[in-house]
Image (cartoon, rainbow, N blue to C red):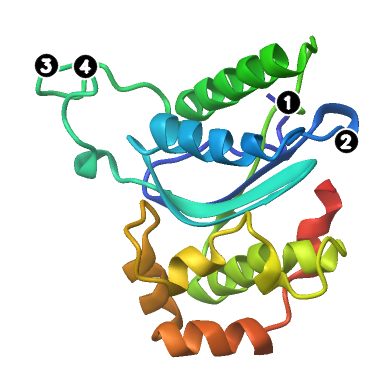
């Protein structure tokens, strides 16, 4: 692993992102977005809390928290203990492999779908985390996929301000911003961080 890619450490917030190999699309058909999220929840939930996400044709962004080891659900293998626990990055690697395999089969393509290794940046304070979440939601507008980020269907924005059941950490995310009303307001006021763009 390159030295500038930090390991995923327990008890740490991260910005996790990746893009298609050679900047190719990772979402080839509309159904791929739902397939991506289904596999995301399946593979990462044992060790990761997802606070926000954005899926954009050839790349994606996620903000979340790698759980403390003591908070992990015993029995990733039915034994009642954590002996089956893998390194956090392995859960994400399993996700990337599963999604790539499914898309390659459906699209009759071969070869790597994602760049390797996947990128991750530790998030060390609440202000940075708030700006990251705003950035993730505003990203489709920045890339001119839509004129208003609120019209993009493949991010967590509406899921976070809605009331439908979700696997997102909705309560924690809204509490970070103060309230649902503050979350909505600050998405209009906060300028996103530009230095997230170097990977795209």
Q: Can the viewer see residue 13 in this picture? A: no
Is 182 on the left or on the right of 165, as rendered? right
> Which quadrant would residue 160 be assigned to in this image?
bottom left
| Residue hosting label 3 | 79
Q: Residues within 10 Å of mark 2 (few under 14, many from 20)?
A: some
Q: Residues within 10 Å of mark 1 (few under 14, many from 20)?
A: some
Residue 77: x %, y % from top left:
21, 16
Along the line of sight, the residue nearer the viewer: 35 or 189: 35
Please tell me the numbered disc located at residue 116.
1
Q: Disc 1 vs disc 2: Cβ atoms closer than 8 Å? A: no
Task: Tell me the SS state at disc 2.
Answer: helix
Q: Disc 2 vs disc 3: Cβ atoms closer than 8 Å? A: no
Q: Report the mark closest to the observer, 2 or 3.
A: 2
Residue 181: x %, y % from top left:
45, 89
Residue 25: x %, y % from top left:
82, 35
Vertical comparison of 79 with 67: above or below: above
Q: Disc 3 vs disc 4: Cβ atoms closer than 8 Å? A: yes
In primary-sequence order, the first of circles 2 and 4 is 2
| Residue hosting label 4 | 77
Cα distance, mark 1 to mark 3? 33 Å
Please tell me the numbered disc located at residue 23.
2
Q: Residues within 10 Å of mark 4 (few under 14, many from 20)?
A: few
Q: Disc 4 vs disc 1: Cβ atoms closer than 8 Å? A: no
């Amino acid at each position: 692993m390159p030295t500038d890619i930090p390991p995923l450490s327990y008890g740490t917030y991260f910005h996790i992102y990746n893009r298609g190999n050679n900047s190719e699309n990772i979402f080839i058909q509309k159904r791929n977005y739902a397939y991506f999220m289904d596999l995301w929840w399946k593979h990462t939930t044992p060790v990761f809390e997802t606070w926000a996400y954005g899926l954009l044709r050839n790349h994606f962004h996620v903000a979340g928290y790698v759980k403390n080891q003591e908070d992990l659900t015993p029995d990733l293998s039915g034994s009642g203990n954590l002996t089956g626990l893998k390194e956090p990055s392995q859960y994400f690697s399993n996700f990337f492999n599963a999604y790539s395999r499914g898309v390659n089969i459906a699209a009759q393509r071969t070869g790597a779908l994602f760049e390797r290794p996947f990128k991750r940046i530790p998030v060390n304070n609440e202000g940075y985390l708030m700006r990251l979440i705003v950035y993730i939601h505003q990203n489709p507008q920045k890339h001119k996929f839509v004129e208003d980020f609120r019209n993009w269907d493949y991010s967590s924005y509406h899921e976070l301000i809605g009331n439908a059941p979700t696997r997102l950490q909705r309560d924690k995310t809204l509490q970070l911003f103060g309230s649902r009303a503050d979350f909505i307001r600050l998405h209009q006021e906060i300028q996103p961080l530009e230095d997230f763009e170097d990977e795209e």
